[in-house]
Every structure is written in C-alpha cells, then in structure tokens.
Image: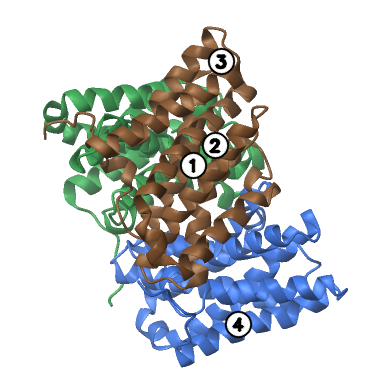
Chain colours: A blue, B green, C brown
Amino acid sequence: MADPGLSVSTLIQFLDLFGTAAFAATGAFKAVEHKSDIVGIIILATITGVAGGVLRDVIFGRIPPVAIANPFYVIITIGMAVAIFFLYRSFKHYEGLILKFDAVGLGVFTIIGASFAYSVFGMNFLAMAFAGIVTAIGGGILRDVFVNEVPIVFVKELYASASFAGVVVFFGMLAAGVDVNVAAIPCIALVTGLRMFAMKYNWNLPRPRV
Amino acid sequence: MADPGLSVSTLIQFLDLFGTAAFAATGAFKAVEHKSDIVGIIILATITGVAGGVLRDVIFGRIPPVAIANPFYVIITIGMAVAIFFLYRSFKHYEGLILKFDAVGLGVFTIIGASFAYSVFGMNFLAMAFAGIVTAIGGGILRDVFVNEVPIVFVKELYASASFAGVVVFFGMLAAGVDVNVAAIPCIALVTGLRMFAMKYNWNLPRPRV
Amino acid sequence: MADPGLSVSTLIQFLDLFGTAAFAATGAFKAVEHKSDIVGIIILATITGVAGGVLRDVIFGRIPPVAIANPFYVIITIGMAVAIFFLYRSFKHYEGLILKFDAVGLGVFTIIGASFAYSVFGMNFLAMAFAGIVTAIGGGILRDVFVNEVPIVFVKELYASASFAGVVVFFGMLAAGVDVNVAAIPCIALVTGLRMFAMKYNWNLPRPRV
C-alpha cells in the first residue's frame, strides 16, 4: 500500500499498482491454502495489500488513510482476491512471477513510505526508516500472523533488510541534494533487485550463533 | 464494540450492550481455556469486546475512541470476565445462547460501523464496508490471534460474509432513500439471522478448489 | 516505551531507559531464538520496546508518537539488538538480570502511561488503567504473537496484574491528593516488586476451574 506522498510520477503509480496487486495475491494464496471462503480471501488479500500503508498513516496522523480515501487500492485487492478464488491453479502456476512483483511492491512501498515521512519531518533518518519499513512490511507481517505463521520478515532471506538498505541509500541521495523524485527510482530498483537476488541465490544476512 | 454514530435508538443501544457482552464472553472463554488468570481473562474479554470499535475509531480519526470516552463498554467487558471467572461452567453450559448473542453483536457492530462511516464520508460504499467489517470482526480476529489460533473469520461458516451482506443491503437501502435509523434494524436482523442460520445449518460460502 | 507525560524526574527518565532497553532485549532474544537475521532482530527488539507506547499514543491522539518524535528510544532498541546479535551468549547468561530490568520497565511504563491519561482526562480510572496497561504490555504481546506464541500476559505469573495493581494504587494516591510526581515512584516500585516476587516465588493469581 502506498500513496502519493511525493509528487508521484506515472511510473511510480504504475509500480505501486503492481506492488499492491502482488501483495494482495500473496495474501489471497495464504487464505486459499487455509481454506477460507471468498470473503475471507478478500479480507486477507486486502489486509496484506493495504495494512502497511494504513498503519503508517495512522501512526503519522494522516486521517483518513490513503487506502480508504482512494478506493483504487481496495478495488485492486478485491479484484485480485476474486481472480485467485476462481483461478487459483493458474495464478499459483505463476507464483514465481508474483513473488517478483512482490519484490517490486517491497521497493515501491519502502520509498513511498520514506518519502512521506520526509515530506512531514524533513531529513529525519529514523522517521524515514520507520515509515518506509512499516509501509513495506506491515501488511506481510499481519498476513502471516493471521494464518498463524512466524512472519517471513523474521525468518527469510533479505526482506526487511532490503527495505532498510533502500532507505539508507534514499536518505544518502537526498542528503547529497538529489531531488526526491529522481532519487526514488534507483532506490526502488535497489530494494527490488536485492530482494530478487536474495530469493534467487538464497542470500541471507548473518544470523547469530546460538 | 459500537458507538452512537447514528442517533441510536434505545433498541440499538440495547442490542449493542448484548453484542459487547457476548463478544467479551467469547474472549473470556478463550482466556479461561488457555489457563489465564483473572487479569488475563479481563484483558482478552475487553480486547474482544472493544478492539474492533477502537480500531475503527483510530483509523477514521475519532480520538479518543468511544470505548474509552464512554466507560460503559469496558465496565460490561470486565463484568462479563469476572462473571465467567467465577461461573465458567454455568456460562459454558449456555455457550449456544452466547453464540446467538455474538451473532447479534456481529449485526449491530456492522451497522453501527457502517453508519459511522456514512456520517463521515456520506455514500461511500468502500468506507462503509471497511468501517462496518473492521468494527464487527476486529475484536474476534485479535482474540483468536492472541491465543494462537487462525481467526474464525478466515475459516468458519459465514461470518465476515454475513457482515458484508449487511453492509450491501444497508447501502442499498440508504441509496433508495430510506432513513438511516429505519434501515439499521432490518440490516442488523439480516446479519444476525444469516450468522445464526449459518451456524445451525453449517452454511459455507464456496471455497476454491486447491 | 514511555514518555515525559508527567514532568518526569531524572530518576524516572533513567528507569525508562532501563525499561526500554530491557524490553528490547527480550524481543531480541526471541528473534535470535527464531533464527532471525540482524534486521529481523532489530525490528522485533524495536517493536517490543516501543509498540506499547506507540499504541497508547495513537489511541489517545498524540501524533507523532513519542517514540518517533524522540529518536532516543529507537536508538536504544537498535543498540540493544546489535549488542545481542554479537554477544548473544553473554547477554543470555544475564537473562535473569534482564528480566529484573524488564520488571522495572513494566513498572515505569505502567505509571508513565497512566499519568499520560491523567494529564489528558484527569481523574478517569478506566482511561488511566487502559493507557497504563496498554503501554506496559502492548510491546510484549506483539513480541510473543509475532513469534507465534501465546503472549506471556495471558499465561504467566502476575504480569498485567502487577501493572493493574500499580494503576489502582496510583489512582488512589492521586485521589488522596498526592502530587503525581511523588506518587509515581512508589507505584513504579510496587509494580516492579510485585513482578519480581512473582517470578521468584512463582506467584499466580487464581485461575478458574475448568
């Protein structure tokens, strides 16, 4: 779930669409696999697609949240849920592709969240990291918790880490005087690329020895 | 958890009381079954009874939430928790009756949530559906997640679906010019009836073939 | 997570620091034990340390929440997470000590939460109890739910109960005319002491016979 915090270019809006749909698809898959009915599938798809952005907006005081003010997001998540309800096998067959879109969502949500905090607080790294990461991982955490799994962000290859890396570079570029709309694109690409490579090559950050 | 978003009639306030108490009872049962102490039982009963409404109010910007501004709700949830602590077997014996009251709660919370969104946004179907369903199912989702179960809404007979059906008919009646207070009663009855029949006859919406 | 709702003395600020660090440490331990990478550890430590306070601020309308406006808290939680990442065995060796600091956190978060509600609503017992308990247990509930465990507050010796007892005495002292800053210290000590004795002697409140 993202929002026009920055004067979003058409490209970012397009990527945002992809991201919301991909997040919703991962939620719909989980719901189907837990034998939800159609309404349960719609709810879990919608939570996965928009909860990160809603959480960010509620914490930072933008009421109503973008995902409620703009019906576009929920229409996408419902559409994706209904499509997967009817065509689960076909969509599941393309799960690899959907996980690539999910990586796009991770990138675009991160940068839209971070740039929203930037528009409110200026150059405050912690606020930007907080907003970027909450936007990017909030929906996925709730999706996993609601089907009784440990959230992917705590156990999988570079996920929140990719999001965090994107915020660091984004902050650095803004600090160096790069325009926010210019900085957004390579940072989205960085997060998305990191996540895709992490999935492909099973990259992990070090874990502590226990 | 509900609130006087519409100029609530005495009847709706009475149903709201039943609903909050019934939701709290389902939370108290879960806590007892997980061997909580009295304070744990009070907390889970209160979360189940009021979290949906608090979540709705936080998302839609009504601060403080009704359930905090008006002590009535929390007094009910605490009272129910204490009663079930002392009289678990007796209450459990009437669990069937309590699930009927829970169905009343589902109906009244749905319509109070939807009419709150209507009072803020006017005829916006998505906002009404969002607010109605969040109010109706938020507490139950948290109850189940907190005792490490997959929420009933994702796995059981018509639950969120009954709530959704109520919003659709409510929206249709308002669109047709029916007064909000007049429309509320039959829509609450619809949700409650659907849920009761679904429990009795084990109705389910279709699930996708996996 | 706490905040200067009362004209906090240096002592309370110091205890608050201890509490946030101790809460963060319990989150970092859980993340390590679930084989999170460094970013997952930081996220779970931060959620555990600040989520209770963020939740309280969002529900009571203080935007942005103290934990975001003041970078100090997140710096502490990140620092603790990084330290535990590198020195897990050493910290784990002192887990008993950290659980004592956690008891300090339980006390100081309870009273800071309750005194925040007091500063907003005056002598409203339910608001004070709500804010105090949410601040004290919110982070721990999310920590446990996110690693798929039933939250400690629903199953363990005096935890939320100790927090609740502190609110009762705090409210009573304010009602008796004691200055809020004077009342805070013994009430923090009460909660902390109750929790420490409960751990040491395995105190439990009665549970219902099922």
SS class, disc 1: helix
**Residue A82, numbered label:** none
* Tags 2 and 1 touching, CB below 8 Å: yes
Q: Amino acid at mark 2?
A: Ser
Residue farthest toward the bottom in the current orientation of the protein? A201
Q: Is residue B183 left or right of residue A147?
A: right
| Percent coordinates x, y for residue C177 in the rendering | 57, 8
Q: Which residue is mark 4?
A: A192
Image position of A188 with respect to B78: above or below: below
Q: Which residue is mark 3?
A: C123
Residue at mark 3 to residue at mark 2: CA–CA distance? 32 Å
Q: Are marks 3 and 2 on the same chain?
A: no
Q: Nearer the viewer, mark 3 or mark 2?
A: 3
Image position of C158 with respect to C123: above or below: below
Q: Nearer the viewer, mark 2 or mark 1?
A: 2
| Percent coordinates x, y for residue B178 in the rendering | 55, 34
**Residue B115, numbered label:** 2
Q: Are marks 4 and 2 on the same chain?
A: no
SS class, disc 2: helix
Of residues B50 and C184, the one nearer the viewer is C184
Q: Which residue is mark 1?
A: B170
SS class, disc 3: loop
Q: Are marks 3 and 4 on the same chain?
A: no
Residue at mark 3 to residue at mark 1: CA–CA distance? 40 Å
